[in-house]
Amino acid sequence: TRAIRIAPSLLSADFAFLGRDAQAMADGGADILHFDVMDNHYVPNLTVGPLVCAALRPHTSLPIDVHLMTRPVDPLIDSFAEAGADMITFHPEASDHVHRSVQMIRKRGLKAGVALNPASPLSLLDHILEDLDLVLIMSVNPGFGGQSFIPSALPKIAALRKRIDDAGLPVAIEVDGGVNPANARALGAAGADILVAGSAIFGASDRAKAIASIRGAAES
Ligand code: DX5
Ligand code: ZN
């Protein structure tokens, strides 16, 4: 079975205690910290930017996975690279030049990802998939934590898994939105590599246990 990496979404953390919550995620067995950047323009919510990423950086050794839900994309890439991000994922509809944005991210030595909304087709990956480190499949509409998982993400993940494996590409599949211990098994079976979870981890009374049960289900 495939090893699954768990990426708690800090969107569900206590923003007044982000360093503490990041540490708790590391202690609880998380592999990656998912950092949701919303601009009140591409998505109807407003969160945090490079200053907060830079403030968080000394408080964790986990990779910081920046999910840019912003338009435009490019002006934030250097700022997040300087703020200590390890991975940057953006929505292709929000960039005028998707290939250029990917190159900008990789030129800074960061891993690059493209995020697909629930109604965005896999064909948006044509001509760019081989340049990516990861694809983020959104299983909710971006903008808010705590939404319900949209089941059409499952066949989409399976189709993407097949495409990546057939081409022999080292591209990871990350899934974001409504992930919980109950649907993690199906997500693992469909071919996910990285599972983002916000409310299912931060809303649990035992967060380490929530991380372990999502991972356990996905790897089963
Ligand atoms: C949604 C964000 C997600 C969200 C996940 O726009 O990209 O990362 O925080 O939260 P849950 O797991 O609660 O759906
Ligand atoms: Zn996200």
Image (cartoon, helix red, strand yellow):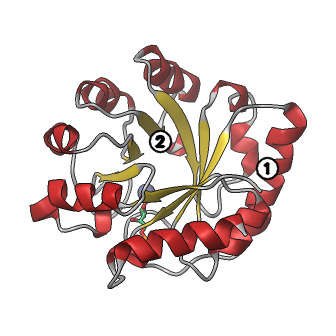
Q: Identify the mark at residue 12; answer none if there is no mark.
A: none
Picture coordinates of residue 92, whole percent (x, y): 55, 40
Q: Are marks 1 and 2 in contact (CB under 8 Å)?
A: no
Q: Earlier in the sequence, mark 1 or mark 2?
A: 2
| Above or below for 63 versus 80 | below
- Marks 1 and 2, how far apart in space? 20 Å
Residue extending farthest to the top is 107
The residue to which callout 1 is attached is 161
Q: Mark 1 Cα within 10 Å, few/some/many (few <14, many 20+)?
A: some
**Residue appearing at x 66%, y 52% in the figure:** 3
Where is residue 192 drawn, in percent x and y? 68, 56
- Tell me the element at label 2: strand
Does the beta carbon of the residue at mark 2 sit less than 8 Å from ligand 2?
A: no
Q: Is residue 107 above or below residue 137?
A: above
What residue do we see at 22% from left, 62% from top?
Answer: 21
At 49% from the left edge and 20% from the top edge, which residue is drawn?
Answer: 106
**Identity of the amino acid at label 1?**
Arg
**Tag 2: amino acid:** Phe
Q: Looking at the image, in which quadrant does ligand 2 appear?
A: bottom left
> Which image quarter: residue 50?
top left
In the drawing, what numbered circle is on residue 90?
2
